Amino acid sequence: MTSTAPLLLRLQEAETSAGRAAGYCWLAHPDGGRFCSLPPGHDGDHVDVFRGRASPTAATGTRWREDVRR
Ligand SMILES: [Zn+2]
């Protein structure tokens, strides 16, 4: 098993995740360990606002771009 799941698999996992049930996009970061915490169906980059912040006061954390338009 690789550490990076294909985008389609990560999308399927997001749709059935607890994070999605809580109201987040929840797409997993390609490198794992981060989950998009924007609303489902948002525009633009995916952002994990809780993890990967440069400092405790930074507004957002890890940001990445993947096309998930359907
Ligand atoms: Zn997202």
Image (tube, helix red, strand yellow):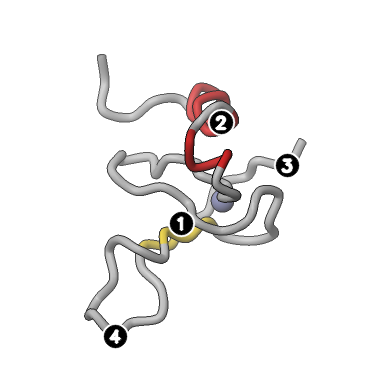
Q: Which image quadrant for residue 63?
A: bottom left
Q: Residue at x 65, y 41 (%)?
A: 68
Q: Which residue is mark 4?
A: 57
Marks 1 and 3, the one that precedes in the sequence:
1
Q: Which image quadrant for residue 12?
A: top right
The answer to whether marks 1 and 3 mark residues whose Cβ atoms lie closer than 8 Å is no
Callout 3: 10 Å neighbours few (<14), some, many (20+)? few
Mark 2 vs mark 1: in front: 2
Q: Residue at x 27, y 63 (%)?
A: 52
Q: Which residue is mark 2?
A: 11
Q: Provide the secondary structure element on which disc 2 rests.
A: helix
Marks 2 and 1, the one that precedes in the sequence:
2
> Is residue 17 shown left or right of residue 29?
right
Instruction: Determine the CA span between mark 1 and mark 3.
Output: 15 Å
Could you tell me how many numbered marks the image carries? 4
Q: Provide the secondary structure element on which disc 3 rests.
A: loop
Residue type at numbered disc 2 = Leu
Residue type at numbered disc 1 = Trp
Spot occupied by residue 65 in the image (x, y as percentages of width and height): 52, 54
Residue type at numbered disc 4 = Thr
Instruction: Determine the CA span between mark 2 and mark 1.
Output: 15 Å
